[in-house]
Structure formats: structure tokens, C-alpha cells
Amino acid sequence: MIVWSSVGAVASVTPTFVDNGGTIRGATNAAGLRVDRLGSHYRAAITIGIGTADGRAALISDLVRAKQEGLRLPYPLMGVDQGAPGTPVMDGANQAGRVINLRGLTPGYVAAKGYWLSIVDAAGQHYLHNVHVGGTVAGDGKVTITLAEHLRVPFANGAPVKLATPMIEGEISGNEQSWQLQRGNRVIGIGFTIEEMG
């Protein structure tokens, strides 16, 4: 697994929600029945800004290796500051559905609708989630949050939650990785799509 600690070179991002559920309709196309299934996840098409050959050499090497091993990087918030939440963790084991309980946050911190977070499982894999109903952290450092999508795995009590810098982790889609070298020591055309595997 290749791990990036920064996304400073990212120029643009096109996020996608991959819905694993669906609507079942009868033969007469009557009222449909929505079926939510576990496994809905995220993918992001990321474009890297123009750089020099020297400045982009290590990044290109990382992408080549990540194509084979997977990539973990901070989810590009593109200017949204999610504040200083403290050190949030899951408050209770085997939580399921969309509602999660957290502890270890800074009292008074507001987890707002639209914020992103990632939850880390026992193996160190990050699962990206979106906050649908946020909340203000109580004096005991606890808050209940409703996610936009279902949890995919039953996390352990105390599983780390990355709220200040959520991470997206997965495979680089497609079977090739390319970039363009230009005169004047410029590198352009670096782009990739990362899709969560968990």
C-alpha cells in the first residue's frame, strides 16, 4: 500500500458515490421497492496540476507502484476546513446501519452535514463516509452522527475515526497509468481514479 500524507499537488477532483443498492419493480412497473445493500462506497477521479519533471518524478513512481499495491491518500477537501475535532474513536463495538456513536472529540466541536470522515478497521484499512446529520460534541467528548450511507463493516470499540483529515483508500482503476512530458521541463496529464475496495 502506497500512502500519501498530502494532496497538495491535486488540481481537481471528481468524486462519485457508487450505490450498491437498487430499486425493484414488478412486471407492471408499479411502485418500486428500494433495497439498500451493504457495500456502497466512493471513487474519485483526481487530476494532478502541472509540475516539473524533477518535481513529479517521485509522484509518478508512487502511482506506478500504487497501480499494483493500492493507494491511501487524504480525501481532497479542496479548501473545506473540518476543524480540530480532537481524537475521535468509535464508541462501542459492532455498530451497524447509518448512525454511529463517537467519543474522544473536543467538546463544542461541530461535525457539520457534508463533512467527510474515515473509519479505520483492525487491519488499518480506511473506509470513507459522509456526514448526513451532524451534531455538536457534548462536554463528555461524545457525539452521535448519521452517515449518508451504511457502515460496511462492524468496527471495533475504539476504532480510530479520521475527521480532520479523512482518507480514501483503494485501487487505481484501469490497467495502465500514463502522463505527458513537454518541452520546458513540464509534466502534465497526470490523472487517476481511485476506488474503495472495502
Image (spheres, helix red, strand yellow):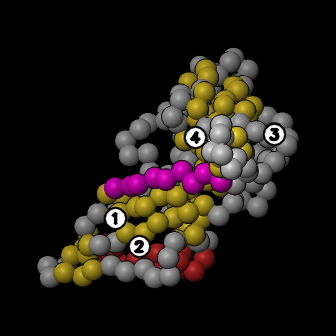
Residue at left offset 70%, top offset 27%: 144
Q: Farthest right residue?
A: 93
Q: Position of residue 160 (x, y in %)?
A: 71, 45
Label 1 crowd (10 A; few <14 / some 14-19 / many >=20)? many
Q: Earlier in the sequence, mark 2 or mark 1?
A: 1
Residue behind mark 4: 130
Q: Is residue 183 magenta?
A: no
Give me the C-alpha separation between circle 4 and circle 2: 28 Å
**Marks 2,1: beta carbons within 8 A:** yes
Badge 1 marks a residue whose secondary structure is strand
- Camera-near label (4 vs 1) is 4
- Camera-near label (2 vs 1) is 1
Give the residues in magenta: 12-20
Q: Quadrant of residue 104?
A: top right
Q: Is residue 118 visible?
A: no
Residue at left offset 37%, top offset 41%: 79
Badge 3 marks a residue whose secondary structure is loop
Q: Earlier in the sequence, mark 3 or mark 4?
A: 3
Give the amino acid type for the residue marked by disc 2 in the picture: Leu
Q: Is residue 81 left or right of residue 84?
A: left
Residue behind mark 3: 95
**Marks 3,1: beta carbons within 8 A:** no
Q: Is residue 33 above or below residue 55?
A: above
Q: Earlier in the sequence, mark 3 or mark 1?
A: 1
**Marks 4,2: beta carbons within 8 A:** no
Q: Is residue 33 left or right of residue 74?
A: right
Badge 2 marks a residue whose secondary structure is helix
